[in-house]
Structures are given as structure tokens and as C-alpha cells.
Image (spheres, grey):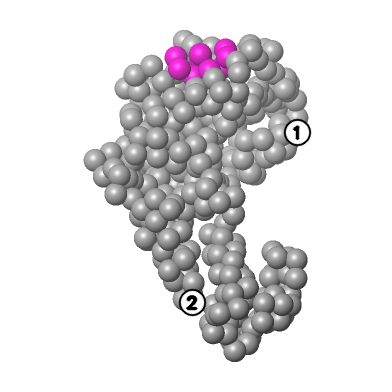
Amino acid sequence: MECRLLNDQSRVFERADPYRVSDYVNEYVGSHRIRLPTVGRPEASLYHRRFAELDLCRISYGDSVRVTSTALDSIYHLQLFINGHCLWRCRGEEHYFVPGEMLLINPDDPVDLTYSNDCDKFIVKLPVSLLEATCREHRWLLPKEGIRFTSARNDLKALDGFVSLMALICQEAEAMTSLPQIQEHYARIVASKLLSLLKHNVDPLATCAQATSFEQISAYIDSHLAHDISVEQLATLARVSVRSLYALFERHANASPRDYIRQRKLDHIHTILSDPNAQVRSVTEIALDHGFLHLGRFSQAYRQRFGELPSETFKRHR
């Protein structure tokens, strides 16, 4: 690999205890465990830079090492192999990666990697939210199960300058002169590049032009306040994954879907209790009608939102 990915100014460890390096990786790159040979004193090195939502990392452990982890859940891992080789195992498959190949680990993939003693690799950590935001920018419909790349093995020669792009980003990260907006732009370019070059389960022809907007979801909630509305039901209505639904509510309402539904129910109850012409026999009745089965918690939530108990609102307007 001709391009230089992270220089000495990004060095965090050199000729260090591999377990110290592993602890650092656990904190900044991803949770994992390492298993080293019982003989010898390997010396590890690590380079690291944070760039927008990306973590850029270059690691060599100085000896053969096995790295295992449960699914990484909220991040994608790219590994570009510079020297040596790596045995990858996942769900009954295995492959020896060599320099010039790239390994892509999905968020729901377990990790089982055995690196050779001369293995040197460059790792890019991308959050799920970055890939999803990039899909939305392209107006691609997100799969309900989340974005998943369908091949772990990729030939860097076929990725149309991807290594050169990463080298440029490493230079920008080390220069530390880029504005946050420029860094975010570069990060989106990386995500777009991966989604345009690699095989995945996103269908570019299935655009989200028909996907339900937040305003439509909010209107649906308002018209069904007397019903038990589930997050899964709203995700189906919006034609997005549950994770994407949470991101949608966070962006538009600064709240989770469940909290937003509860707020809308409370607002509606407050409007009814404040209306002297509304036909309400009791606070208990209207609370139960809106799905609040625990009256003590309902009263507490109501007071936190409106500064008084629902019974006080009811009495004042009668």
C-alpha cells in the first residue's frame, strides 16, 4: 500500500505493552479482547486521530494475536491491511486477508480475527448514524433491519481511490486546521463512497420520497392518543428502521418516540381539563382513557410538565 496512513505525529504508543494498547483501543475504537502467545515480549504501536465522527487508527501488536469481540452494535469497522495477514472468522466463514484487501465488519457481526506477528492495519470506525444520515441525504429508503454490507472482503484496487481518500483525510486530521463543517463533509464523503462502491442491502431505486414525514407521524399520534401506540408501529408507518425512527424524533422533537407520545397525551389531557365546556366526569377517567394506568405516575408526569396536579387544573376551570 503506497499511501501513508497516519504519520509519527499521530503516534500514541511505540514499542509498548500490547495490553496497554488494547486498553486504549477498548476506549476509543471498539470493545474487544486480545490473546497473545505465552512466550516472548511483543512490542505494540498505535497511531490515532479523531476526525468528525470518524476514528482513524493504525495498530500493530508486534506478535501474532487473536482479537475477539461480541457485535459492535452501533459502529462499522473498516480494516485496511498494510503488512502481514489476518485470519477472519464469522458465522462459519473464514478468509485470510492480505495487504491490498479491506475487511468490513457490520454492527451485528461478531469479531474473531487472528493477526500475524508482522500484521500492520489501518482501522476506520464509522458510527451507524453517519451511514443512515448519508442514506437520507441520497433519499434512499433505509432497510428496517438497518444498513448491512453483504460482503466482508473487498479488493482495494477495485474501490476507485478509496485509500487515496483515506490518506487525504489523515493529512487533514493531522494538520488540525479543518473547520468542523469541513471535517463533517469529508466524513459524509467516506460514507457515500462506501455506499456507492460496496455491496449492501440498501436499494438506491427505492427512494424515501414516499416515506412518511415527521409531521405525518405526529398527526397520526395526535389522532390516536387514546390508543397504545408502539415504536414498532410508528417505524412501520414511517418505513424506516427503529433506530432511524429514534434519530428522526431526536432531530425534530428532541425526545424519544415514547417520550413524545407521552408528552402529546399529557398536552391533550391538559387541554381537556382546562376547557370548562369539556364533558369530563373525573381526572381518573380521562387518564385511563389515554392509557395512563398508574395514576400516581400520571399525576407526577403531569405536574412536571404543567407545574400543578391534574386535579388542580380540573377544579380551577370548573
Residue 199: numbered disc: none
Residue 145 seen anywhere in this rendered image of the structure: no
- Drawn side of residue 123 relative to residue 146, left or right: right
Kind of residue sitting beneath label 2? Ala
- Give 60 or 305, whichever is nearer the viewer: 305
Identify whether 288 is placed above or below 191: below
Indicate the quadrant where residue 308 lies.
bottom right
Q: Residues within 10 Å of mark 2 (few under 14, many from 20)?
A: some
Q: Residue at x 30, y 44 (%)?
A: 209
Q: Residue at x 47, y 53 (%)?
A: 245
Identify whether 106 is placed above or below 296: above
| Residue 170 drawn at (x, y percent) | 56, 17
| Residue 191 drawn at (x, y percent) | 44, 31
Quarter of the picture holding the C terminus: bottom right
Check disc 2 and report the residue beneath it. Answer: 226
Q: Residues within 10 Å of mark 1 (few under 14, many from 20)?
A: few
Magenta region, residue range: 164-172
Kind of residue sitting beneath label 1? Arg
Q: Earlier in the sequence, mark 2 or mark 1?
A: 1
